[in-house]
Amino acid sequence: MTTKSAPTTSAPPLRKAPAVHSMKPRQLTMMGLGSAIGAGLFLGSGAGIQAAGLAVLISYLVAGTLIILVMWALGEMAAANPNSGAFSVYAERAMGRTAGATIGWLWWLQLVVVIAAEALGAAGLLFSVWPVVPVWALALLFMLVFTGINLAGVRNFGEFEFWFAILKVAVIVLFLAVGAALLLGLLPGVESPGAENLTANFAPQGLGGVAAALFVVIFAFGGTEIVSVAAAETEDPERSVGKAIRTVVWRILVFYIGSVFVIAAVLPATSTSLASPFAGVLDAARIPGASTAFTLVAVVALLSALNANLYGASRMAYSLAQRGEAPRFLTRLNGAGVPLPAVAASVAFGFIATVLELLFPDRILPALFQLVGSTCLVVWGSALVSQLILGRRADRNGVPLPLRMKGFPGLTVLGLVLLGLIFAVGFSAEGSRVQLLSTFALIAGITLACAAGARISARSRRVE
């Protein structure tokens, strides 16, 4: 991406974030990195290797290319118009009010469900190594703690998320170093597995396995788009967004592809250790306490994602309320400049889910994930379409942009083609087909509700 000096845009500026620009650029960068390095990598990468073996790297390269293009597109729009509604606002500017509201509510619902799942998942993992406090009590504690952190102000939230991300990055760097030493035969008393697993593990289930792994990988990359939401509360967003996105995208690829290569090289695709792949590699390296250590790391990863997702959900609710697409009371701020009712609304289901999961174990959240599991693909698609429309509009009007995506519009179109191929692959497999159809049914319901709300709002304004 390249930068230009003029900060103007092709339309009047939209309302800004709820608080002052108190998030530091380093916090924004680490938030984007930390939101993508979560349970999807620490736990989900094993499922991808089981499906595709070493060929899962093809899935990571396809998904990684897509997320880079999406992040470049979001970076261009966020630098021009930093707004807490991010891609929802950009969809509204490009495609109309109903489209913007639909994308905003869709992403909010996704995060609300994910927040609940992350609290319960972290509680379950912690209970497995420390069976003292019940799972429901741990989940409740996590919800209370992270609600408090989010209500304390964006600076405190950003600093907390910064150190969470630092811990995860440090663990991955250490893991890559140990994995490299193991593969090169540099660990005393431990025999290197050599290249045997690399050849035996390559696409054991053929193209179908690579396709199945693709959806596992897509889910792992979900959440990176939160950088565009946080940009509105970051110092000097025009410069910070570009730096954060350039840093995040290459680090994600290095960490993900490097880690998956090490895991696939050390563990066979049929290994039961792939249930917790990082711990499995460290066990193979004969490092004591590996399973417990990485279970705790996975807990931290889930809580970090919970923290970031609660922030993102509350800001999206705030933005929707600002634009008349949600109840107006959600725009109220507390003394720290945080939209308190929006945080409460975003976290409420997490508390309810804790009780529901106790009453109906393993039934509530899987059903909800069936609805929202593919929403990140729709959000990414809306970002690409919005950037294509807004970028062309700016070019027609001769309006310079502070941050411009390289290769526009060709790379944006490439992103849409990749997205179309992923949807085609998804509809070819029964499991992902049901998930996609459920997500599209949810989108249709939200769109109808938003369109009806817009008509009612317009009618009431005419009456007034």
Image: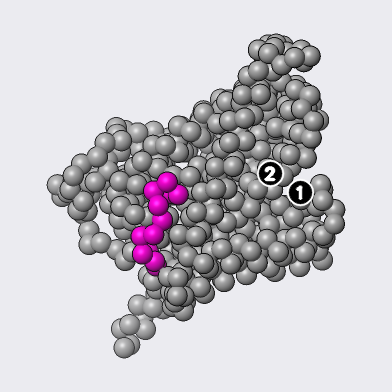
From what the image shows, is residue 228 above or below residue 406?
below
Residue highlighted by disc 2: 298
- Which amino acid type is shown beneath numbered disc 2? Ala
Decide if residue 243 is in sight here.
Answer: yes
The answer to whether marks 2 and 1 mark residues whose Cβ atoms lie closer than 8 Å is yes
Decide if residue 193 is in sight here.
Answer: no
Return the x and y of residue 240 as percentages of the image width and height. Answer: 34, 47
Nearer the observer, 255 or 386? 255
At horizontal 66% and vertical 54% (from top left) the residue drawn is 118
Circle 2 residues within 10 Å: few <14, some 14–19, many ≥20: many
Say which mark, if any, is on residue 125. Answer: 1
At horizontal 22% and vertical 62% (from top left) the residue drawn is 12
- Which amino acid type is shown beneath numbered disc 1? Leu
Instruction: Reply yes or no: does residue 289 show up in magenta.
Output: no
Q: Which residues are magenta?
A: 17-28
From what the image shows, is residue 171 above or below residue 195?
below
Return the x and y of residue 295 as percentages of the image width and height. Answer: 74, 42
Return the x and y of residue 379 as percentages of the image width and height. Answer: 47, 50
